[in-house]
Image (cartoon, rainbow, N blue to C red):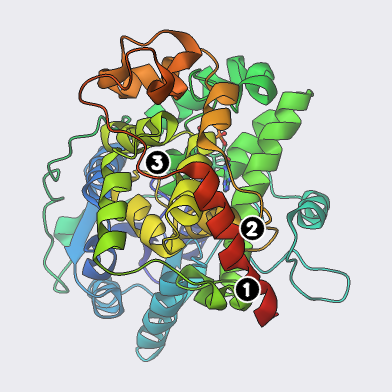
Amino acid sequence: MTDASVVWFRRDLRVHDQPTFLAAADAAPRALALFVLDPALLTPSGAPRRTFLFRALRSLDEALGGRLLVVKGDPADAVPRVAAAVGAATVHVAADFGPYGTRRDEAVEQALAADGRALVRTGSPYAVAPGRVRKADGEPFRVFTPFRRVWADHGWRAPADTDASTVTWLDPAEKVGGPRAVRIPDDDPVDAALPEASEDAALARWREFLDDVDDYADARNRPDKPGTSRMSVYLKYGLVHPRTQLADLAKRRSDSVESYRTEIAWREFYADVLFQRPDSARGNYDRSFDALPLASGAAARVSFDRWAEGRTGFPIVDAGMRQLREQAWVHNRVRMIVASFLVKDLHLPWWLGARHFMRYLVDGDLASNQHGWQWTAGSGTDASPYFRVFNPITQGEKFDPDGEYVRRFVPELRGVPGKAVHQPWALPDGVPEGYPEPMVDHKAERLEALARYDRVKEAR
Ligand code: FAD
């Protein structure tokens, strides 16, 4: 047994329910808490995610009594140097199953092994680690419903009983040599109002939501109501673990509880799919969609910009795109509506929309985002059939029946009462000043989308 180990934080910026703490405490009497600012991850993240991360790191550092060592660089270089500086035989992490994280961890593991040290993976950001849930024949699932059944039968561990005092943290000032400590960077300028970035805030929000969880099944599809948990960003950065949520849900029984557990299962399903098919982060999961004719050139760029700025002339789409800028978050129903509009009304590639989301969402998560987009585009697992084209008018009228959501985010339409707000072109005085006419004829573009889809069917 050596004198110290290293706990390397990544997507688990919390002190409760932290199995890595237990593993580190078993390995050595003291541990160094480490975070590596990795330019390969930070550079492509948008300002909302970077700022949320920096705030979450400050809060974690405080929870650890100011003992978080932050360094900058390629982890394959930085982590082994830190481990060598404290003489650690083991570096403890929660496993990462994303395409970049998997490659990075293999490189770190090899670099550590070259020096006789080990990377020890304990747990992951999921209740059931990707790759574990399999069909009877050992193959991965491609369809959600049977995955969910086997996932629930597989079960998960109870939350780990840990807090900051589970480990005796080394003072980073005692570290001799290795990469230089850096300050947690200042916030990037962000226009959006971000949620508070701390484990306390995550748990407080979770408890608040649990009080109303029984309304979830009815309210979850209504963007005009505060009916969803807003836990996605906390799950993304591991300020709470889904295990903690599942343990709390297990104490209750209702359709809403079941419905919430199903949403957690979707998150786990998409992580599993991305793990099985890392190429699906950048291209179609269903390769026959490679034959889909896509819009390109200058006109397509103009269309994309109007979508991104929330100036399509379709109120629910514009409200969603403006919510993205104002809150760095969009309601799930509206994510589907704006995604459908980009892909099926504008005929643009889903990955352009997915990249835009990853830049502006604070909860941007590669697995859930790319597969949420592919579900809408029809090219993913379990996808909504391509021929089901969301109608932005009827979707608005159904899920924002009084038009409150639209009026909240589209000030030009604030004077239009009730659900008339979903068709401003039909108002007696025409479209209110400052708001655009619809940029396309939805009925015509729906037929165009179906005609393009014929090329996919031919390619099968
Ligand atoms: P709740 O309704 O309270 O759901 C609880 C939790 O379940 C969420 O926090 C989330 O972790 C999980 N969840 C819910 N719905 C889904 C889903 N469809 N797929 C996967 N997990 C789900 N979610 C992200 O976390 N990051 C993304 O980048 C992301 N991009 C998306 C892009 C598109 C085009 C679509 C259609 C969906 C995307 N989602 C993404 C899924 C979903 O929209 C968000 O998880 C949800 O809106 C977050 O709000 P909430 O926490 O209030 O959700």
Q: Is residue 441 above or below residue 113?
A: above
Which x, y percent locates residue 320? 39, 34
| Callout 3 amino acid | Ala
Apparent side of residue 97 relative to residue 55 in the rendered image (left or right) = right
Mark 3 C-beta closer than 8 Å to ligand 1:
no
Disc 2/disc 3 C-alpha distance (Å) = 49 Å
In the rendered image, residue 274, in percent from the top left (x then y), is placed at 56, 67
The residue at the point 38 percent across, 12 percent down is: 428
Q: Amino acid at mark 1?
A: Val
Task: Look at mark 1 in the image and give the residue it sits on.
Answer: 456
Tell me the CA gap for discs 3 and 1. Answer: 54 Å
Earlier sequence position, callout 1 versus callout 2: 2
Q: Earlier in the sequence, mark 3 or mark 1?
A: 3
Give the label on residue 164, or none: 3
Q: Residue at x 29, y 65 (%)?
A: 41
Density class for disc 3 (Cα within 10 Å; few <14, some 14-19, many ≥20) is some
Task: Look at mark 2 in the image and give the residue it sits on.
Answer: 386
Which amino acid, by three-letter code, is at mark 2?
Tyr
Q: Is residue 151 above or below residue 198?
A: below
